[in-house]
Amino acid sequence: MTAKKTAQSTKSKTKKKTLVIVESPSKAKTIGKYLGSSYKVVASVGHVRDLPKSKIGIDIENDFEPEYIPIRGKGDLIKELRKEAKQAGKIYLATDPDREGEAISWHLAFLLGIDPASSCRIVFNEITKDAIKNAVKNPRAIDLKLVDAQQARRVLDRLVGYQISPLLWRKIRRGLSAGRVQSAALKILCDRENQIKNFIPKEYWNIAVEFKKGKSFFAKVTEYKGKKITIENKIAADDVLASLKDGEYKVAQIVKKERKRKPFAPFTTSSLQQDAANKLGFTTKKTMMVAQQLYEGVEIKGNGTQGLVTYIRTDSVRISEEARFAAKEYITENFGEKYLGNNFFSNKKKDIQDAHEAIRPSRVSMDPDMIKESLTKDQYNLYKLIWTRFLASQMAEAVFDSVQAAIENNGYGLKANGSRLIFDGYQKIYSSNIEEDKDKLLPELEEGEILAPESIDCEQKFTEPPSRFTEASLVKDLEEKNIGRPSTYAPIIATLLERKYISREKKTLIPTELGFVVTDLMEDYFKEIVDTGFTADMEDRLDEVEVKALNWKEIVRDFYATLKVELEVADKAIEKVQIEDQITDQLCDICGRPMAIKVGRFGEFLACTGYPECKNTKAIVKSVGVSCPECGGDIVAKRGKSGKIFYGCSNYPSCSKAFWYKPTDKKCPECGSLLLERRTKTSNYVCSNEKCGYKE
């Protein structure tokens, strides 16, 4: 080998790699495959620097300067990142493309000594080879407007949480919390429950006449002498019936027209949460967890790890021209040109920073049914929902033949409606679930035609109270009221449930007594925080930090001036609130008195009502409906000293059988042991026998 070739060989061996830092290990694995051997991709595993947990961490006297520290437990990770950074020829910060991701990159830059103004930041909306390669070719500086928008929210939330929550602890009980968005969301739920409790039903009557001309159809009384009427009681209903009986039914007008229904826009975060709740029964938390898996990458047989959907935290309904063209090709090839639409969707907020697209499949050619065997059931269902919604958004309108018949009798007007789907359009692949879209055919009628009634249905009705919120309808209401942001909805609902401010019953969210007590206190002493209008205005101001470079500390100063006064007043004025214990039918096995449900550091437990004479306590155990494989006792959910839930035999200590994951009544087909619920990207259940290793 010549000296020149030896020098080139040595140079190639010592060439430094480019370091790419992402947030999650699974994303690092996917991206690493795309970038190749000259890059090293590592994960920060979320935030690396944050406000301390032990104190407020905001220097209020120094113009609300945040006091960031490295997150406890991440010392070794930070040391490893610094080591990798020293060895790298170039460093790219590739955290998520949103405020939170920008802030993580900013903190990483601080810890690793990177100039935020340098071209160190790369962003991509989808984890595909082309998107990653393009991002690396177009690095930029860290966007400090995004960082400041995140800091503003973080500081405001910390001021509210760390100053009002201790007050709630002192005045009500330990473990409670308040939040800038959380408390407003709780008030919405409490207000709805009060509306339901205070609702006074009003009587009304429906009168519908059945006719038959080849087929039966109904016409409902809606007018009298051209004006809409409400039949309020039986006397009025009897008068209408008498008039109808004396007269004849004449077809006054037939209106035929074509009705079109446009497809829905592609998913935003909130519309995905709503549709997944309504169609798949997913909680908001589950939707975001599964969507994150689809975004970060799933192992597809024959294709390696693939990021299946674009970034999942977005308020935008925009899609790229490349995605539009790919959808056009797919629709034309698979359904024909007549199914191709020309739809453009705009965002509700005109000044929204439109950095992201809507949530869509990374490749529309990746048909859900083609890759079904590589996905878990939940992944498949959610991916199919995203895929069909996106494809449908680029398809033609559904077209209906609509017919309305106006029938008159003695001054009363009756209406009969009919419709028929004549072209399915986007509904070929995406169900609208809209009642008026279902076929309801009327027979052929002619104006002036006299109809003979078959029967008259006269039914007493009462107005209904507003329905309780589900997770889907609460998300919709929060978005409409401009409270919080879609990425915060799942953790807000989870916190309200965890704090026992609300309970979930048959998918509906119901405030508890504790939820009402906290809301009443907040409403009396911290009106702005629970006021939906104030919270919405605050969101707009926080957006202006991002969009118009508004000084974030100015917002904090204005907010805190009021909060400080309210805190001083509340601390002096609020008396200790007593919440009645929930007495159970269980008796104390020491003194025989009833046991009551109490709340401690790690949740609810049973305590004797004879305290302090009797200090007996017991854990609240919930059976999982599975028998212990060792002794036949009930397997119950328990909470360990650390607060972590595990599953153990109710006959403990005589039987010490226990599992970290929830046992099921399914048996392992290979060894016969119990299967445990353990959801991963590739399986839902694992064998409880560690030597077996079976998964499904």
Image (cartoon, helix red, strand yellow):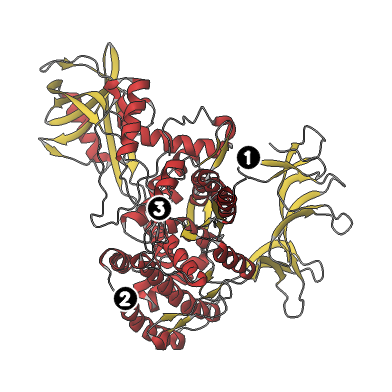
Q: Of marks 1 and 2, which one's residue comes earlier in the chain?
A: 2
**What's the amino acid at mark 2?**
Ile
In front: 516, or 206?
516
Q: Horizontal placement of 528 versus 514: left or right?
A: left
Foreground disc of the pair 1, 3: 1
Residue carrying label 2:
555
Element type at marker 1? loop
Q: Position of residue 340 (x, y in %)?
A: 28, 26
Residue 693 percent location from the top left of the image: 77, 41
The CA span between labels 2 and 3 is 26 Å
Give the residue number, with chain letter if any, for mark 1: 682
Q: Residues within 10 Å of mark 1 (few under 14, many from 20)?
A: some
Q: What is the quadrant of the N terminus in the image?
A: top right
Q: CA distance from mark 1 to mark 2?
A: 46 Å
Q: Position of residue 357 (x, y in %)?
A: 35, 47
- Which of these two is toward me, 443 or 216? 443
Residue 384 is marked as none
Q: Earlier in the sequence, mark 2 or mark 3?
A: 3
Q: As shown in the figure, which amino acid type bears the numbered disc 1?
A: Thr
Query: Image quarter for residue 149?
Result: bottom left
